[in-house]
Amino acid sequence: MNSLVLLLIGVAMMAGGYFVYARYLSERVFRLDPAYATPAHTLKDGIDYVPTNKFVLWGHHFTSVAGAAPIVGPGIAVIWGWLPAFLWVTLGTVFFAGMHDLGALWASARNRGQSMGTLSGRYIGPRGRNLFLVVIFLLLLMVIAAFAVVIKDLLIGTPSSVIPAWGAIIVALFVGQMVYRWKINLALTTVIGVTALYALILVGDRFPIELADSTLGMAPGTFWIVALFLYAGVASLLPVWVLLQPRDYINGVQLFIGLGILYGAVLIGTPSIVAPAINDNVPEGTPGLLPLLFVTIACGAISGFHGMVSSGTSSKQLDSEPDARFVGYFGAVGEGLLALGAIIAATAGFRTLADWEAVYSAFGNGGVGAFVDGGGAIVESGLGLPASLSSTILATMAVLFAATTMDTAVRLQRFVIQEAGELVQLKIGKGIATALVLVAGLGLTFSQGAGGEGGMRIWPLFGTTNQLLAALTLSIITVILLRKRRNPWPALVPLAFVFVVSFWAAIVQLGDLYEAQDWLLLGIDVVIIVAAVWVAFEAIISMRKAAAEGPEDDDADLFTSSESDRT
């Protein structure tokens, strides 16, 4: 199978989804209204609520939701063959992820930029809200701790990515000033920012940085993890326009350039896919394709974390409601394109089937490493770039996306803690809430040793938790659509499918964890299952009630509530 054919089919499917299905959703289902005053205007505070150019907001949204997961998941899932991964990524992006992300953004923007946790209280009920917050908290904790470890491993494994990864922060600070303070044209700002970022990549490739065995009394891995948490804490407290927005925007442009380099190499080199379409010779110990494929690839097909970003930060920056189509749906398409690139890199970036099988000798192998190494080989052969520079470009892409997801997750977790405090009439300030997030994340990350092994401790439950959260988010969207007498099926069909496969996966994992006597993960899995089933039960009751009641007027979206609801 020629990888170029796979690339063209995948891109055509996702383009069709954006130009056809997204238009249908925007005009017929959500009925996006340019006259509607978004929370970015009605609640503008210059910190979290900031009207934002749709291209800049797309960059923030896209890079926040992308992270390393659309690379890691497909890079692991191709062990079952490239065809199942390809079908789930393409069809999932068009009909599941796009609907979910656009719907969550629309629902939040229509309700003062409130989070899915808060919306669950309004549309499902207080019990559903409390359990929803439990699932959200666990998911964000997994993302924060695990991504810190992923970034640490990349910085150590590819030392040439250190300078561009940290230098991107300085570039982003200047971009923020250029756009909001100096009012420089966005196109010119983009050219300057991206040029500076790729100049840093060249410098990093020339001068790789490897830390000494002891830096400030810490091993390299420990130092990088502590530095990442400190950065994420500071970034989450700054106004979004200072660092979060410009960093994510430049990273988003950089990703599309990076994908252009990878896709261009495929176009010129046309490498053959050496991996089987369906692998009948999986290594011993590899779980069955069903239902694990649908939770191994979460980001890149559909992801509950996207709903947290849509309702947690993006909805508060939406300048015009019709922008939601570009920000939400095209953000999902961008992640799907990244996942497609990961599939191609992890299946066509090897010389022979034997080389591929040597990497995929056990379930869990591949991931980011297969993307960087395989993609680097494709770029080297297709475009003639040196192997080290090719690997630096791809490693920097992975680091920057994981970092933007991590700092966004810290900000979102701060919102969750503040919201949980409000439920018990306890007002928690931003600084204290952020400190609690950092303590919890660092505690989990270092719970198994100074190397950060604990960061991956509960990662096996990430995919299942993420997909269950996506199903619960779709249940809120469905209730809202039923209340407004809109067509609920675009949300209801993905909801049913995702809930069934993710619940199935959670039950399978429950048995595996019991046999392994992993009581910590077993306990967490039970909590997640109970919370998800309870919320789903409450959601079904709410759907039946919404279908029986009279239609809700759009003016109901403008309900008033206290300023403390801004989460």
Image (cartoon, rainbow, N blue to C red):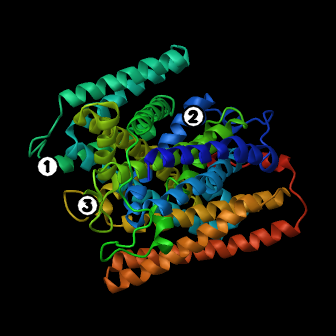
Establish if 124 lies above or below 487. below
Of labels 2 and 3, the one closer to you = 3
Report the disc number at residue 354.
3
Q: Position of residue 336 (x, y in %)?
A: 52, 48
The answer to whether any part of residue 154 appears in the image is yes
Relative depth, front residue between 155 and 201: 201
Relative vertical location of residue 440 with respect to residue 278 in this rendering, above or below: above
Q: Can residue 122 be seen in this view?
A: no
Residue type, numbered disc 2: Leu
Q: How far apart are marks 2 and 1 (CA)?
A: 37 Å
Neighbor class of circle 2 (other Cα within 10 Å; few <14, some 14-19, many 20+) is many
Compute the Cα span from label 1 to label 3. 36 Å
Give the number of the disc on residue 57: 2
Q: Residue 219 carries which label?
A: 1
Instruction: Identify the residue shown where x is 29% and y is 36%.
Output: 380
State yes or no: discs 1 and 3 in contact (Cβ < 8 Å). Answer: no
What residue appears at the point 57 percent right and 69 percent down from the top-left corner? 131
- Figure disc tally: 3
Disc 2 to disc 3, how far (Cα)? 44 Å
The quadrant where residue 192 appears: top left
